[in-house]
Amino acid sequence: IPYILAFLCSKLASHFAFMLNPTLSFQVGNMASLPLLLPTDTSTRSRIETLAQECIDIARRDWDSFETSWDFVRHPFLTYGEGASTIEAAFSRWSDFAESQFQRMKRNEEEINRLFIEIYGLEHEMSPEVSHEDITIQRADRELDVRSFISYAVGCMLGRYSLDEDGLAYAGGEFDISKYHSFVPDRDGVLPVLDDEYFKDDIVGRFVEFVKVCFGPVALEENLEWIATSLGRRAEETSRDTIRRYFLDEFYRDHVRTYRKRPIYWMFSSGRQKAFQALIYMHRYKSDTVALARTRYLLELESRIDARVKSLQKSIDSGLAGASRAQLSKTITKLERQLAELRDYDEEMHSLADDMLEIDLDDGVAENYAKFAPVLEAMR
């Protein structure tokens, strides 16, 4: 099987297949018609099989480096950057490893091509070289890898992963908080994603804590700066501002794309003003989760924003003038729009909370997600 697999992945097999069927797709008969030759020299066959197995191992390690793999253990920054005090150093180690694997795969594929070209006597007809674009394993990418690190952090915040255990720590059944020591996940399983730090378990605050636990307190600000720069920090933003903007505007879109419109984290969203957003983990959902999100977060947020509007209005009424008055008026307008959105959204949340909906994980994401469509972010 490794020999046949190596042949099917070679330039020869691709060339032969297009000769048999020069279209966009191959049929079973096309593959069955490929001329497979076995070398008379057993050492050549053994060499091809060894190279093929090494390519399989490299591809498996690459696939397992990302959380959509069943055998994912932990993020590469932590696997290959163990002991590093900065994320930049961890990324550098991961980048060096990924590049070495990429180059090894390229050399192996070219060696396999060369051996098959010799077996078929096509030395003067074909070249064994493989372009970088045809190597399918990943190279390190600073922005994408930082985004995947943030995704892993959210998984730790919601209990899917634990810094103290390999692989999945929780994917259904009885939730065991004793599995988490280094970094304890959110107790109620609801993470507020808001434009300001209204709650203690604010997602940006929890992410900062996660970075601190992983890489220590000494270089914390340096690490946050590096992350923010990787995400595209704007001139007027602090590192925390950039991270908050990412969570507000881009994180969920990235998550839906990663899981191909079958998200395991769900985002409560009040609408265009983004007055209220909160993440939950599908596997930790309970029939009272919507009610908890409403009473503990939504109604409390509504009360706090209302109090803030009144406080700002008092500042204006006290005779404040000039640019400060204009800025406060602008802030009040924004907050009043958010309040209107929250009140409309609360009607939807209240109705669903009263229904105490159950979900069955065996029904899959799409069917369960549809039950909560009025209060969740649309999958795009």
Image (spheres, grey):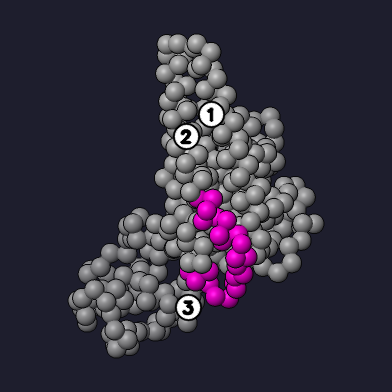
Q: Is disc 1 placed on a helix, strand or loop?
A: helix
Of badges 1 and 3, the one in the foreground is 1
C-alpha span from label 1 to label 3: 68 Å
Q: Amino acid at mark 3?
A: Pro
Q: Which mark is residue 336?
A: 2
- Examine the image and state in which quarter residue 129 appears: bottom left
Q: Is disc 2 placed on a helix, strand or loop?
A: helix
Residues 154 and 128: in front is 154
C-alpha span from label 3 to label 2: 65 Å
Q: Amino acid at mark 1?
A: Val
Residue drawn at x 35%, y 55% is 132
Where are the magenta residues, as a range?
345-368
Q: From the viewer's perspective, is 55 left or right of 131? A: right
Q: Within 10 angstroms of label 1, few (less than 14), some, or many (20 or more) residues?
A: many
Residue drawn at x 50%, y 50% is 345
Residue where numbered disc 1 is placed: 309
Find out whether the residues at labels 2 and 1 contact each other: C-beta distance under 8 Å: yes
